[in-house]
């Protein structure tokens, strides 16, 4: 997703300027228009560079936000009014950006806005949060709704940290391999080239050695240009990935990748079910819950499937059947959701589906990493062996000719 700066007016005619995340300007315009805002302009957030725009995302860190909500819930349970609770938390907030956001929220609430609308206007929080607050405001049970949201975020953080821990070693290994190859090609190989020019003519060198020396010489000569070109390519790819067409293409490739594509799909299903179960438990109707959960998905294919399913549910179709017809939801998840619908325990069943797929993702990722790590080591060993063989082959040849 990219970030956009929006200028708009609310139902009371007040001019507002805020930051929203979305896949395109049209997507954000439609969303805000449905909420009753009159949108005047939508501009990509960031600065222009060479004909394209590099967007900067500014979000409140999830761990800080969970701590804030825990403290906020404690103050509300103690009987403090919302404005007073916000003022107390403002004084203790050390993060300057988060403090400025909370100040804006406090002023909006003082001006008569709902707490959910005040947080939604900031563009710095997950969309599920203002929706959860709205459910608490409508049901009059803000404490329980906040408690459920905190539990959801804590479980999500735990799950994410486990996945990140599984990826640390392969990532470090990949970085080390890349750094070693750069060092070999830009430093070691050119030094051997200087040595062989002093002791032998190029005609006496084996073809494999000549090839490696040419690679090393070109690598050293064009390394700065290659680094600049790579940086430009990464920035351009990042901008393209955030576009409508690019995000769909990247998501399609990601889902189609052998082994890792299935893990990514299960990860998205786990997040979807956990989020949907939390919203339904908070008292939000099924269709708004589906729309909120779907718009929060990273995968465009899953987001489109949920949008399609929400239209069918609005027409009166069962959720399980609607999800099955999209062709994106795993069969086991559909069956479990169907059981939850028939027994009237859909939120609990959605949480069970989320737990099942979270465990499945962790097991699958562990198995995948156990295969990927040896492959990285084997490839690294083969490349090093090839480079060393090509460099030392003339020495072996000279030694054989002397005997």
Image (cartoon, rainbow, N blue to C red):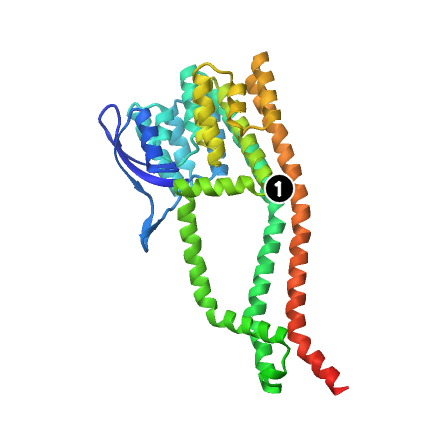
Label 1 CA crowd tier, 10 Å (few <14, some 14–19, many 20+): few
Q: Position of residue 198 (x, y in %)?
A: 59, 86
Q: Nearer the viewer, residue 221 or 110?
A: 221
289 in relation to 262, above or below: above
Q: Is residue 356 visible?
A: yes
Q: Position of residue 17 (x, y in %)?
A: 28, 36
Image quadrant containing the N terminus: top left
Question: What residue appears at the point 59 percent right and 51 percent down from the top-left corner?
Answer: 171
Q: Is residue 35 left or right of residue 388?
A: left
Q: Nearer the viewer, residue 327 or 314?
A: 327
384 in relation to 362, above or below: below
Image quadrant containing the C terminus: bottom right
136 in relation to 52, above or below: above
Question: What residue appears at the point 59 percent right and 55 percent down from the top-left corner?
Answer: 174
Q: Position of residue 163 (x, y in %)?
A: 59, 41
Q: Position of residue 142 (x, y in %)?
A: 45, 20
Q: Is residue 150 left or right of residue 109?
A: right
Residue picked out by circle 1: 259
Q: Nearer the viewer, residue 183 or 113?
A: 183
Question: What residue appears at the point 58 percent right and 18 percent down from the top-left corner?
Answer: 338
Counting every numbered tag in the picture gives 1
Q: Is residue 188 left or right of residue 398?
A: left
Residue farthest toward the top in the current orientation of the protein: 343
Question: What residue appears at the point 33 percent right and 40 percent down from the top-left corner?
Answer: 4
Q: Nearer the viewer, residue 345 or 200?
A: 200
Q: Is residue 188 visible?
A: no
Q: Secondary structure at mark 1?
A: loop
């Amino acid at each position: 997703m990219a970030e956009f700066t929006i200028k708009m007016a609310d139902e009371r005619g007040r001019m507002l300027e805020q930051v929203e995340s979305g896949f395109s300007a049209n997507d954000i315009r439609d969303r805000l228009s449905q909420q009753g805002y009159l949108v005047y302009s939508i501009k990509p957030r960031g600065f222009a560079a060479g004909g394209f725009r590099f967007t900067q995302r500014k979000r409140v860190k999830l761990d800080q936000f969970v701590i804030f909500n825990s403290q906020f819930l404690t103050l509300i349970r103690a009987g403090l009014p919302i404005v007073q609770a916000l003022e107390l938390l403002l004084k203790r907030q050390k993060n300057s950006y988060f403090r400025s956001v909370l100040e804006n929220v406090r002023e909006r609430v003082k001006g008569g806005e709902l707490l959910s609308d005040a947080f939604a206007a900031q563009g710095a929080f997950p969309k599920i949060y203002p929706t959860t607050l709205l459910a608490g405001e409508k049901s009059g049970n803000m404490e329980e709704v906040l408690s459920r949201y905190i539990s959801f975020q804590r479980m999500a953080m735990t799950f994410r940290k486990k996945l990140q821990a599984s990826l640390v070693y392969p990532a470090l290994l990949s970085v080390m391999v890349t750094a070693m190859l750069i060092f070999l090609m830009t430093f070691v190989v050119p030094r051997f080239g200087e040595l062989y020019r002093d002791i032998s003519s190029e005609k006496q060198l084996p073809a494999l050695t000549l090839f490696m020396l040419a690679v090393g010489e070109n690598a050293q000569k064009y390394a700065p240009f290659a680094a600049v070109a790579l940086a430009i390519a990464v920035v351009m790819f990042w901008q393209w990935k955030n576009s409508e067409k690019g995000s769909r293409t990247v998501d399609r490739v990601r889902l189609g990748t052998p082994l890792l594509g299935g893990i990514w799909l299960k990860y998205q299903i786990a997040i979807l079910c956990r989020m949907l179960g939390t919203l339904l438990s908070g008292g939000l109707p099924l269709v708004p819950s589906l729309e909120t959960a779907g718009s929060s998905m990273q995968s465009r294919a899953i987001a489109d499937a949920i949008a399609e399913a929400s239209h069918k549910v609005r027409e009166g179709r069962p959720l399980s059947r609607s999800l099955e017809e999209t062709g994106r939801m795993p069969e086991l998840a559909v069956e479990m959701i169907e059981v939850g619908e028939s027994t009237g325990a859909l939120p609990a069943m959605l949480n069970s589906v989320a737990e099942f797929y979270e465990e499945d993702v962790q097991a699958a990722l562990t198995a995948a990493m156990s295969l990927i790590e040896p492959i990285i080591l084997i490839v690294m060993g083969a490349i090093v062996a090839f480079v060393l063989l090509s460099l030392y082959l003339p020495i072996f040849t000279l030694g054989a000719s002397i005997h």
